[in-house]
Image (cartoon, grey):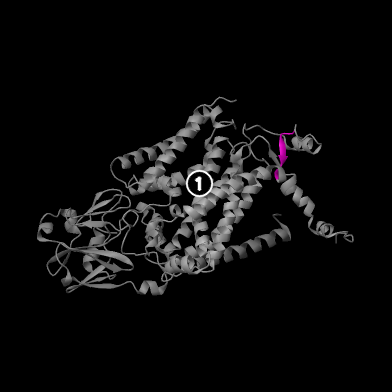
Amino acid sequence: MEKNGRRGFMGKAFGAVAAVGAVGSLVAMKKSWDPLPSVKAAGFTTLDMTAYKAGELVTEKWRGKPIFVLKKTPEMVAKQNEDDKARDIVVNGEHFMVAIGLCTHLGCIPAYYPEDEDFVCACHGGKFDFAGMVTKVPPPRGLDIPPFRIDGNKLVLGEIGPEYEKMKENGVTL
Amino acid sequence: MAHFEKATSVKDWLNQRLAIEKVEKVMASEYWIPKNINFLWAMGMVLMITFILLLVSGIFLLMYYQPNVATAFDSVNYTIMREVGFGWLWRHIHGVAASVVFLIIYIHMFTGIYYGSYKKGREMIWISGMLLFITFSAEAFSGYMLPWGQMSYWAGMVITNIFSLGGLHLDGLVEWLRGDYVPAQAFLNRFFMLHVLLLPLAILGLIGLHFAALRIPHVNNQDGEEIDFDAEAQKYLAGDKKGSKVMRFANDFMSKDMMVVGIYLIFFFYLVFYHYNFAMDPVNFDPADGLKTPAHIYPEWYFLWSYEILRPFSVNIGLIAFGFAQVIFVLLPFLDRSPNAVPANRRGAFGIWFWLLLIDMIVLTAMGKLPPEGAFSTIGLVAALAFIALWIALPFITAKEKKL
């Protein structure tokens, strides 16, 4: 294309118009793929923490994801190391493991083996202990803890309480 | 305006407007193919026929399939399989062809590697072919989501999670790809769109590019011989058909090509009618359930080798190895430093490299199917490391190769 003259100018003018249009359409296309407001609005789950039995894993659902709730037995609480303790969620003096039940590797659901008190992921062989800490790779970190707020005997998932914020600050969960 | 005469026939009328005779010559009767080839050169046509089978069966499936999380599973497993007349046929053709197409692609690829058909001006044929492989992989994956069974759901979960790129934690990107926190309605709808529109369009465009890339360097031959196609074509047209090293694409080459296609189609429809089960994972006959992972998640056989490269490592290293495996084949023309474009068995160390790579990929495939325990884990890890080592060694062994 000529650098000067009318054709050169017309070329540049079209280029400018096309660039604005291209950026605009990319923004629109990106936004079209965002999760819908209705999907985002349905993102809260309330759990009644008095309903769980110690040593028994219950799977709840939050944002379509499985949530592991395990009320720890006194023996489990006694043998926890520092990492495990940092992950404890204490409601009315009872200790709970609450975590998103998806392997932090690529998102399969690990199965709980009560006799070994650990979780094993069938997809790629990862393991977690009863507090949700990794004991065998490939998972890069312990099971993620969903945002939560303690409300008396209840736990609200999706809302951020001070206990969750503290965990996030200390790098206990992402 | 150009000058037009009164037409003497329908053919002449079309010829004046569309130059159909010239087009026929350029595309077929004077498109020259070397004589020195074998049945492996028919794989391109076999792939084309398989693609048409996928397209036609897909059109019929599309008329009853419902891309909705509540109805997708039943629209496939009840409506198409039990109600639609011959619906089972379209589904089994589609499923079997989706699997077999990868077998033929791998044969086609390894034929190209063995005979050096990615060198000396044929680089774009190889690159466009590898782009087709990648698009076909995306097409296979997106199609696998549509029946919305357990394997669909969990494969969708695992594969989209790869885009969080391990330690980078791009969870926002994963949620954007899914349009939800987990694979759900938005996810199914957009993968449906990709499978039936955007990716097939890309495939058609890439097939055009792949064919166009063949025109100037022409098809390779069994000895990697450099043929003067113009001179040989002159010889053929002058009447010396026997002495010429080339033949017409149609009908000379096509007649043999379609013979291979015929044999292939008998094998193909034998699978469709009697052995379709290998392409239909039983786990995918359970409807998708976001709260229950199947005991073993594994991809279809054609992805097992790259899956096994991902699996034995910690997440970040695994992803790097996986990314390496996905792109490294594309770079083959540039990693092979030797000027020799002859069959691998005449290239010394490269011949050994070729067979080691093939065996390694078969081992990776076998290990990818087995649960990641004990000895299988170790063999898988060794094979994954061997795959990476082979590709790193390639530029060195080919640079040392003696010029023939």
User: Is A109 placed left or right of A116 in the picture?
Assistant: right
How many numbered markers are drawn?
A: 1
Outermost residue, right direction?
Answer: B6
Q: Is residue B311 magenta?
A: no
Q: Is residue B373 above or below residue B403?
A: below
Residue B122 placed where, x, y %? 62, 40
Residue B289 placed where, x, y %? 34, 65
Instruction: Look at the image and give the residue range highlighted in magenta.
Output: B244-249
User: Is A104 placed left or right of A50 in the picture?
Assistant: right
Residue for badge 1: B103
Q: Is residue B213 above or below residue B346?
A: below
Q: Is residue B247 magenta?
A: yes
Q: Amino acid at mark 1?
A: Leu
Name which quarter of the figure residue B185 lies in. bottom left
Where, quadrant-wise, is the N terminus of chain B in this rendering? bottom right
The residue positioned 74% from the left and 48% from the top of the image is B26
